[in-house]
Amino acid sequence: MKCPKISFNSIANVISIASGVSLAGIIGVGSYVYLNKDAIVDDIKEAAIESVMGGMGGGALPIGTPDLAAPSDSAAAPSVPSAGLGIANF
């Protein structure tokens, strides 16, 4: 059985083809990212916000928790007890 003759030319052709395919892939991926960069950034922002807000519940307060909203008028605000030392209340 004869051993096939491998020439420098055939090795150079294989390396050239591999280089061309790699370059085409890099250009393709780079073009895709460049053309869709706004959508990619928006997706990453939404995922980051969801991961941060997801642990907070994002709904109504659990039963038994006091309302954390500020009172709308001063009549609903609790009165400040006197200090008992003759200090004026404002």
Image: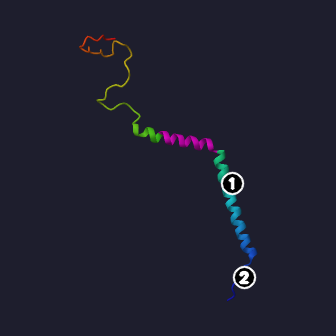
Q: Disc 1 marks which amino acid? A: Ile
Taking the image as shown, residue 13 lies to the left or right of residue 37, namely: right
Q: Disc 2 marks which amino acid? A: Lys
Residue under the image location 40 percent in, 40 percent down:
55
* Quadrant housing residue 14: bottom right
Q: Which residue is labeled 2 in the image? A: 5
Magenta span: helix, strand or loop, mainly? helix
Q: Position of residue 15 (x, y in %)?
A: 70, 68
Q: Nearer the viewer, residue 50 or 85?
A: 85
Magenta-drawn stretch contains 18: no
Magenta-drawn stretch contains 47: yes
For the record, the magenta segment spans: 36-49
Taking the image as shown, residue 74 lies to the left or right of residue 53, namely: left
Give whichever of discs 2 and 1 has the lower sequence position.
2
Q: Position of residue 8 (x, y in %)?
A: 74, 76
Residue under the image location 64 percent in, 53 percent down:
29
What colour scheme governs how the chains and residues are painted in the rendered image of this protein? Answer: rainbow
> Please, what secondary structure does the residue beneath circle 2 have?
loop
Q: Position of residue 81 (x, y in %)?
A: 26, 15
Residue under the image location 41 percent in, 34 percent down:
58
Residue under the image location 52 percent in, 40 percent down:
46
Q: Which mark is residue 12?
A: none
Quadrant occupied by the C terminus: top left
Relative vertical location of residue 71 with respect to residue 16 in this rendering, above or below: above
Taking the image as shown, residue 48 lies to the left or right of residue 64, namely: right
Using the numbered discs, state the Cα–Cα distance from disc 2 to disc 1 in whole angstroms.
35 Å
> Please, what secondary structure does the residue beneath circle 1 have?
helix
Q: Residues within 10 Å of mark 1 (few under 14, many from 20)?
A: few
Q: Which residue is labeled 1 in the image? A: 27
Relative vertical location of residue 60 with respect to residue 18 in this rendering, above or below: above
Relative vertical location of residue 24 with respect to residue 90 in this rendering, above or below: below
Relative vertical location of residue 5 with respect to residue 56 in this rendering, above or below: below
